[in-house]
Amino acid sequence: MANFPALLWLNFRALLSTMRVGRKKRSFSGIGALALLAGLSVYISGVYSSMLAGQLAAVGALPLLLILMSLVAVILGFFFSLFAAQGVVFGAKDNDLMLSLPISPFVLMLSRTLALYLENLVSTVFVLLPAGVIYLWHGGPGGWTVLPLLLVSALFLNLLPTLLTLIVGFVLAWLSGRFPRKALASTLFQLLLLGLLLAGSFWLSSSMGNVGTAAPAILTFFQGWGRPFLMLANGVSGGDLLQLLALWALCLIPFLAVVWLFAWQYKSIITRLSTHRTRSDYKLGRLSTGSQRGALLRKEARRWFGTPSYVFNTGIGLLLLPGAGVAALIYRDSIAQFQMLTGGMSLAPLVLVGIAFCLSTVAITGSSISLEGKQLWLLQCAPVPVTTILRIKVVFQLLVILPFLVASWFMLSLAFAFSPLEWVLLLADSLLFALTCAPFGLWINLHFPKLDAVNDVIVVKQSAAAMLSTFLPMVLVLIFFLLWVFAQDLLGSLGLLLIYTIVLAAFALLFHLLLLRQGERLFHQLSD
């Protein structure tokens, strides 16, 4: 166990990764990843807690806030670390090296599990503490002991999402080793989880308006399967130490049992998971020929569809686009009533902001270069112009986006009853934003490659290029939103859409030129 602290730190850094710029590695990326995770957790907790607290306080059910936010903490922890267990605990690329060292499999498994626990702890703490502050602000019972008890309870409650991610990670790793179409099976399983999460989020958002009247029914539900969350609220708000001790035991005992089971057979488990069924993929037949561009495009498609974490992290916005369109059509009458009440407020620019936000999350090119990894030299030595390689990567992202974007644009324009000119400008601006994001993400990835990642999860979730190619376009989305807030009366809907068109066309042209002029040089420098 003398090596345990070093192993724990090593695996925790592997989860957070590091920012790579050329040959230099900077330690602040791990802090940045934690800060981003903490900030997102605080934002989600603050928004939902503020919306819920006023309604619950009015009906005398404020402790229900602690129940709901503890549930949110578990869901967020599970969502944020969903792929880490598969990639770091069961599917790490350094398993052979680590098992060859004088380290017991039990210690190795325990260090990786606790690293996963520490990552989850950030989101759990920063969800529960803001909820506790808002709970006290609205006069919740319990006094000053609420926050310390919440903090201690977070240490135990955090065991639940860690336990869930361990089990799901094992299932995903098992699927990867047993099914011929392992990537497809894993992707479908993860998309199912994502669909359930989005459905739960939409249900929670739609239930905000009547949560006060539904408080008794919600409490009845949590007296069954949600008993741990009810015990937390009763223990914290009422100072019931027996319920808190029972909660801590209920979280700790199953966690220790599962960890002990996995750790006891850890070497055997990862050995079996790494074995694959042999198949005969060689068949005698006529060889077909194709173009260079077609081969490169198929390569990008196989990479994207064959990497479940890649699809999951860049596909959320794709699902949100048609989902928003369907929701708008369902609530079409409510939208019409809102437009009448606001006196014909210009909503087309606001719809564009929503579309652009979804598109900014589809940063496929932001990880495209990094995912080449050690095989990058094959592309560098291929008898294909570098500009063609880069252009195909941009084109693939646009081809993935286009059907979802067009479907969403049509349904949203129909639901909001836009004028014909607004239809055209909304589509043009949406396409221009997509034409901006695709080359921008590739340009960023050429500047901030991550070619030595332990696994693909780190590249698509925590690399500098993945973050920058996602969040920097969101800054432009925020500027568009502020422009709509402060200039809609002055410029009107068409005026704002025209300004968006000019700005987006300029950015799209700029990043295409940058990629054209700098792309080849940056691409060849990656091997230096």
Image: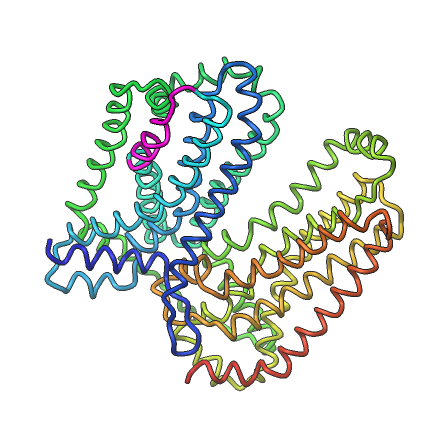
Q: Main secondary structure of the magenta part?
A: helix
Residue lying at 37% horizontally and 58% vertically, measured from the top left:
16
- Specify whether 428 is left or right of 174: right
Residue drawn at x 48%, y 46% as measured from the top left: 188
Q: Is residue 142 magenta?
A: yes
Asked if 259 appears above or below 368 in the picture, the reply is above
Snapshot quadrant of residue 163: top left
Region of the chain picked out in magenta, as a range: 141-155
> Viewer-proximal residue, 236 or 379?
236
Q: Is residue 96 visible?
A: yes
- Measuring from the top left, give residue 15's x and y in whole percent: 34, 56
In this picture, residue 238 sits left or right of residue 185 = left
Q: Is residue 225 visible?
A: no
- Tell me: 65 left or right of 407: left
Residue at point 75%, 36% (across, down)? 329
Residue 148: within the magenta? yes
